[in-house]
Amino acid sequence: MTPPVTTAHAPITPLTPTLQRVAQHLANGLTAQEITTQTTLSPVTVRQYLRDIRESLHCPPRCKPPVIVHRLFTTRQVASPTANRPAPKLDSDQLLLLRAVAERSDARDVAVAAKLAPADQRAALDQLLADTGARDTTHLVILAHGWKLLPADPTPRSGASQ
């Protein structure tokens, strides 16, 4: 019998100071366009820096912003947010969905990880956003880290979870 194959994860590459500044903007909830507007960087440069950040974090090219932001916090590449209001009471299903959104980019993977039927995922996510006061899933992940609802330490990930 062959033992299971384990994959060693490559260490996260520390961000350069420039990439760290762009990453902090992302971790503050800004979109690429908003980062362009708030900095003197061109849209092309911001897109390239975001690709570089994804590569440093070992995120696949289609990795969604909430996953990137979660990894930025868990790998301590950017400052963790502080909560400006108390955490809402979330049930175990909502916490499972929250973690799935923070760790997975593909909608089907999010549904499976959250133990939801794909048809029910949107309604459950909309309810979670409403219950937390988050404007979108990236903001949700930022708030959740401020409330300490997501693990602060990186967790092993398989390629399918990206």
Image (tube, rainbow, N blue to C red):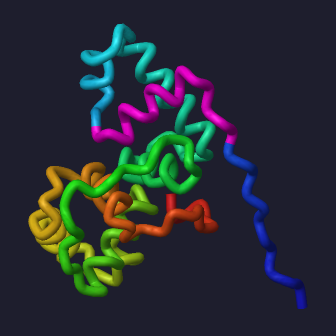
Q: Extreme right residue here?
A: 1
- 13 up-or-down from 135: above or below: above
Seen from the viewer's position, the closer of residues 100 and 40 is 40
Of 2 and 11, the residue lying toward us = 11
- Identified at 46% across, 44% down, the residue is 79
The x, y position of residue 122, in whole percent, is: 17, 67
Provide residue 153's location: percent of width, then percent of height: 57, 64
Q: Is residue 85 above or below residue 52?
A: below
Q: Is residue 78 above or below residue 21?
A: below
User: Which residues fall within the magenta stretch?
Assistant: 13-29
In percent of the image, x 54 and y 34: which residue is there?
Answer: 53
Quarter-of-image position of residue 87: bottom left
Q: Position of residue 62 (x, y in %)?
A: 45, 44
Q: Is residue 20 magenta?
A: yes
At which x and y percent is residue 65? Answer: 37, 45
The N terminus lies in quadrant:
bottom right
Instruction: Say which residue appears at 28% left-offset and 81% top-offset.
Output: 116
Q: Is residue 13 left or right of residue 96?
A: right
Is residue 46 at all visible to an observer of this figure?
Answer: yes
In terms of secondary structure, what is the magenta stretch mainly? helix
Residue 100 seen anywhere in this rendered image of the structure: no
Task: Residue 140: name its quadrant.
Answer: bottom left
Decide whether residue 148 is among the magenta residues.
Answer: no
User: Is residue 19 toward the left or the right of residue 69 in the image?
Assistant: right
Give the camera-side residue of 132 and 47: 132
* Residue 70 image-quadrant placement: bottom left
Q: Is residue 52 above or below residue 77?
A: above
